[in-house]
Image (cartoon, rainbow, N blue to C red):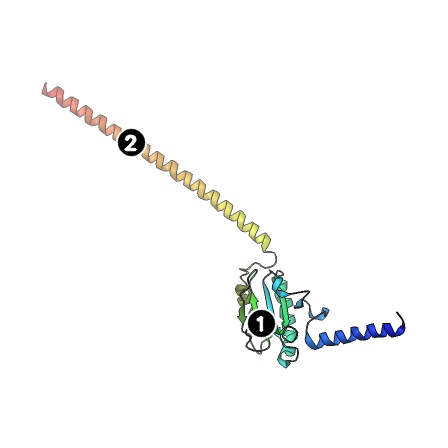
Amino acid sequence: LNMRGLFAVFLVFVCAKAANAAEYLYLDNPDTEPIIDHTEDKPYTESTAPKVVEFYSPHCGGCRAFKPTYIEFAREFTEKYPQVEFHAVSCIAHPDICRKENLRGYPSVFAYPGGSEISVYLERARGLRKPFDVDDLAAKLKLMGKGEGDGEADEDDNDEDKESDEKDDEDEKEDDEKEDDEKEVDEKEVDEKEDDEKEDDEKEDDEKE
């Protein structure tokens, strides 16, 4: 390529970046991690992970103001629940997707439990540092307390359940043995009673004779 060709390629690249900047708030920006801006290459709809999705307009002042809050909350939340993904959808770049969601305004944020296409609207707490309650969001995502390190906790729970089951089996065995012993005692008492009655009858017969 000659200098003119190189300049043309550079100009196209700059224009593409400018267009992306006009249509997206989070795209290809390491400062906005872990937010994933929805594109054809990275569609949020193909993710089966539990996720939070913000629908926004880059021209919306409230969306631009919410951007650092959303990023900070996503970082704090994924520290506790690393399996959760945070996405964002530009309604300027992808108007068809946003129309399907029947949005109430910008920004609108929804929670999607893992593997589910059914969304739950998240009411933002205005004026607070955290826009959402962590425990409430975890419940909506159906995480059931499965945060970082819960694998070990699950193993411990399984061990405890196993020990509990073994103890129940032992108790049940003891109860059965006790019941058998009581049954033997009852049968013995019945036999002795029958023998006594038989002796009494024989004695009575002898007296008659």
Identify residue type, mark 1.
Answer: Val
Q: Position of residue 29 (x, y in %)?
A: 72, 70
* Residue picked out by circle 1: 109
Q: Residue furthest right?
A: 2
Does dot 1 land on a helix, a strand or a loop?
strand
Instruction: Name the quadrant containing residue 102.
Output: bottom right
Q: Residues within 10 Å of mark 1 (few under 14, many from 20)?
A: many
- Residue 134 in view here: no
Is residue 205 or residue 166 the one in the foreground? 166
In the rendered image, the quadrant that contains the C terminus is top left
Taking 72 as reference, is 115 left or right? left
Image quadrant holding the N terminus, namely bottom right
Camera-side residue of 63 and 147: 63
Residue lying at 89% horizontally and 73% vertically, measured from the top left: 3
Query: Mark 2 falls on what kind of element?
Result: helix
Looking at the image, the residue that sits furthest to the left is 208
Image label count: 2
Q: Earlier in the sequence, mark 2 or mark 1?
A: 1
User: Which residue is label 2 attached to?
Assistant: 187
Residue at image position (19%, 27%) is 197
The answer to the question of whether label 2 and label 1 lie on touching residues, with beta carbons closer than 8 A, is no
